[in-house]
Image: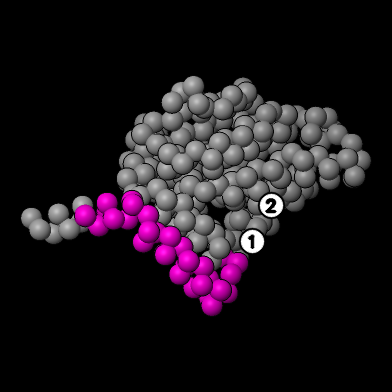
Amino acid sequence: MKENLPQLTDCLLALDNNIATLTFNRHDVRNALTSTTIADDIVTTVEWVNKTSTVAVLIITGAGSAFSSGGNIKDMAERGGDFAGDVQELEARYRQGIQRIPLALHKCEVPIIAAVNGAAIGAGFDVANMCDIRIASTKAKFGETFANLGLIPGDGGAWFMQRVIGYQKAAELTFTGRIINADEAKEMGVVLNVVDAECLMDNVMALANDIASKPTAAMRLTKRLMKMAQRTDLPDFLDICAVFQGMCHNNPEHLDAVNVMMEKLAK
C-alpha cells in the first residue's frame, strides 16, 4: 500500500497492519511547527486517514531528540518567517498556518496516539494534547512556555490542555510556563504511561495493535462519540448513540465479532 501514501515534505509516513505512523522529520530545527511544512503534512495526513477506511490508528512521533519544539525561536527573535508582519498579517498567518493543526487533528476519525520521544514544548506540547492518548519516553519533557515569551497559546492549546488534565492543573502550567519531566506529566495525567526510550515505539505499537484489532467502523464511530460527548447535552447525545448503534448492528463487522465471541464461549 506504499504507493497510496500521500507525498509529504517534512514528515515521514508509514502504514503497517492498518496503523499509520507520522514522524516529524525536521530534527535540524527540533521539529519546529513554524518555518517548516509540518503543519501542511499533518493536514494532508489526516485528510488521507479519514478517506482511507483501512487505517485504524494514527501514531504521531518525532525524529531526533525532540517531539516538537513548537515555534521557531530564531524567527521570533528576528520577527521573520511565520512571525513577520503587523497584527492583521499575523492573525491571517495563524489562521492559515498553525491553527490548521488543531482543526485537522480534532476531525481525525481514528484514535491518535502521541509517542512523545523527547521535548514537547509550546505548540509541541499542545499537539501532544490534541492526540487521544499520550505515551512518553523517560527522555520526554513538557512545557506550555508561551507566557515566558510574552505570548499566548495561539494554536488553541488552552482549549485542549484543560480537557486533558482539568482547568486548575492546566492553568498552573500555562501561567507559570514551567517545564515538567515525564514522571510529573504522568502524575498530572498528561500522559498515560512513561516507558524507557528504547521501548517507546514497541509500547505504543502494542497499544495501537490492540485498538486496530477492533472492528474499524465501530471504532471510528466511537471516536466521533468521544469528541461529541464534550460538546453535546445528554438527551441529544443519547439520540446520536442510538443512531450509531443501529449502524453498528447492521454492519457485517459486528456479526463477525459476535460469532468469534460465541466460538470462544463454546470452548
What kind of element bears circle 2? loop
Most extreme residue toward the bottom is 235
User: Which quarter of the image is occupied by the C terminus?
Assistant: bottom left
Residue 142 shows in the view? no
In the rendered image, the vertical position of residue 218 relative to residue 241, given as above or below: above
* Residue 76, label in figure: none
Does residue 10 appear left or right of residue 140 in this picture? right
Q: For mark 1, does the 10 Å Cα neighbourhood hold few (<14), some (14 to 19), or many (20 or more) residues?
A: some
Residue occupied by mark 1: 171
Residue situated in front as seen by the camera: 69 or 225: 225
Q: Give the residue displayed 66% in from the left and 33% down from the top.
A: 40
Does residue 88 appear left or right of residue 95 in this picture? right
Q: Give the residue displayed 47% in from the left and 56% down from the top.
A: 221
Q: Give the residue displayed 77% in from the left and 48% down from the top.
A: 151
Q: Give the residue displayed 42% in from the left and 51% down from the top.
A: 217
Q: Main secondary structure of the magenta part?
A: helix
Question: Residue 120: x and y, percent?
Answer: 57, 40
Residue occupied by mark 2: 156
Which range is magenta? Answer: 230-259
Query: For residue 232: magenta?
Result: yes
Question: Residue 238: x and y, percent?
Answer: 49, 73
Most extreme residue toward the left is 267
Residue situated in front as seen by the camera: 259 or 31: 259
Q: CA distance from mark 2 to mark 1?
A: 14 Å
Query: For residue 61: magenta?
Result: no
Tag 2: amino acid? Gly
Tag 1: amino acid? Ala
Residue 129 shows in the view? yes
